């Protein structure tokens, strides 16, 4: 374990029997950034056995772009050059990746890749599919081809031009891009949970830490106990969540629920936050014993409810279909 204090987003690089530790830290030096406060990346040589620094800290990138942030530094070597790749602009729609190189070593001095033809190597701005394009790695496959692997998961082809990496021919990163390589055949997958207990599978989690356990298992499956908190509140409601793992998928829930008091509701939801979600549920109201309510939210954050009455059924199935935009 590296013992350097206050280091964030660390990475290791080895060269000629030496190991270098690069990371990011806060700076308050007006001579380094016009913002007066920002995040800058640095490197130092370390003893791999102890994790202790064996040399001075060398600052190697601070940024005047956007919020004055240069983070997630990764160093690699190719063709006689050392390369430094940093995420800049902050984790927002300004998020992007920059590249620098040095002939001398992992401490620089660093030459900045030409703006417009190399830098920023990736910047998607407000692209609807992939926005936060910083914090990527440059990797070489077994066939000698280079790729950009993003933290917001994507894989983009890389060409080397005049000793600089050019990602996806400087076009926007999308969910599907043209590249030569081994094709991955998509397999149709089916997942099912019958809730046989005695504990939930690891893929399930609560929105926040519950005050007490709100479910149990029996022969019928999972029993989820209602609570006082709505899913729109900053508490831990009686809700279990699971990550969506495919853009195109069908999600079906079988629900056995018979509300006895007006206001009781159970169902399923597509969840982003309490301000952005869609749900479909069964509830009781003063006017209806069994009312279906479907909630959706628009771009202004306004919720709309669509209602339908159903008879007293033993169980009900709710299905949500997810498809990429334009499909």
Image (cartoon, rainbow, N blue to C red):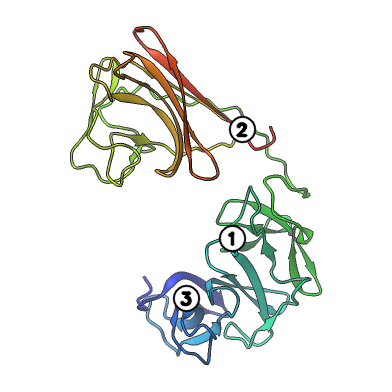
Q: Are marks 1 and 2 in contact (CB under 8 Å)?
A: no
Q: Is residue 89 above or below residue 37?
A: above
- 193 relative position to 126: left or right: left
Front tag of 1 and 3 = 1
Q: Which mark is residue 93?
A: 1
Toward the bottom, the furthest residue is 31
Image quarter of the C terminus: top right
Q: Can you identify the residue that label 2 sits on? A: 323
Q: Secondary structure at mark 2?
A: loop
Q: Which mark is residue 24?
A: 3
- For the point 62% across and 65% down, which residue is it? 96
| CA gap, disc 1 and disc 3 | 21 Å
Q: Earlier in the sequence, mark 1 or mark 3?
A: 3
| CA gap, disc 2 and disc 3 | 38 Å
User: x and y percent of residue 244 in the render?
Assistant: 49, 37
Q: Secondary structure at mark 3?
A: strand
- For the point 35% across and 14% down, which residue is it? 290
- For the point 45% across and 90% down, which residue is it? 56
Crowding at dot 2, Cα within 10 Å, few <14 / some 14-19 / many 20+, comes out as few
User: x and y percent of residue 240 in the render?
Assistant: 34, 35
Crowding at dot 3, Cα within 10 Å, few <14 / some 14-19 / many 20+, comes out as many
Q: Is residue 116 above or below residue 316?
A: below
Residue closer to the observer: 234 or 176: 234
Q: Earlier in the sequence, mark 1 or mark 2?
A: 1
| CA gap, disc 1 and disc 2 | 23 Å
């Amino acid at each position: 374990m590296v013992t350097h204090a206050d280091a964030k987003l660390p990475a290791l690089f080895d060269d000629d029997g030496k190991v270098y530790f690069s990371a990011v830290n806060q700076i308050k030096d007006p001579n380094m950034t016009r913002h007066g406060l920002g995040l800058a990346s640095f490197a130092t040589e370390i003893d791999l056995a102890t994790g202790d620094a064996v040399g001075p800290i060398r600052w190697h990138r601070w940024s005047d772009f956007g919020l004055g942030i240069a983070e997630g530094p990764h160093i690699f070597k190719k063709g006689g050059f050392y390369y430094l790749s940093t995420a800049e602009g902050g984790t927002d729609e300004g998020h992007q990746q920059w590249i620098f190189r040095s002939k001398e070593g992992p401490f620089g001095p660093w030459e900045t890749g030409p703006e417009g033809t190399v830098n920023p190597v990736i910047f998607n701005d407000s692209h609807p599919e992939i926005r936060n394009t910083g914090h990527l790695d440059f990797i070489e496959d077994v066939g000698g081809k280079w790729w950009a692997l993003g933290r917001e998961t994507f894989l983009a082809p890389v060409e080397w031009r005049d000793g600089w990496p050019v990602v996806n021919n400087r076009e926007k990163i999308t969910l599907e891009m043209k590249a030569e390589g081994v094709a991955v055949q998509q397999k149709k997958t089916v997942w099912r949970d019958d809730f046989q207990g005695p504990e939930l599978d690891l893929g399930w989690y609560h929105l926040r830490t519950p005050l007490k356990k709100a479910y149990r298992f029996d022969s019928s499956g999972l029993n989820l106990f209602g609570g006082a908190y709505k899913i729109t509140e900053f508490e831990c409601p009686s809700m279990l969540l699971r990550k969506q793992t495919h853009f195109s998928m069908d999600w079906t829930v079988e629900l056995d629920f018979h509300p006895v008091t007006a206001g009781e509701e159970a169902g399923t939801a597509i969840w982003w936050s309490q301000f952005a979600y869609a749900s479909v549920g069964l509830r009781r109201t003063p006017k209806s014993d069994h009312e279906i309510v479907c909630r959706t939210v628009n771009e202004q954050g306004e919720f709309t409810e669509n209602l339908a009455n159903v008879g007293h059924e033993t169980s009900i199935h709710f299905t949500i279909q997810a498809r990429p935009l334009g499909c």
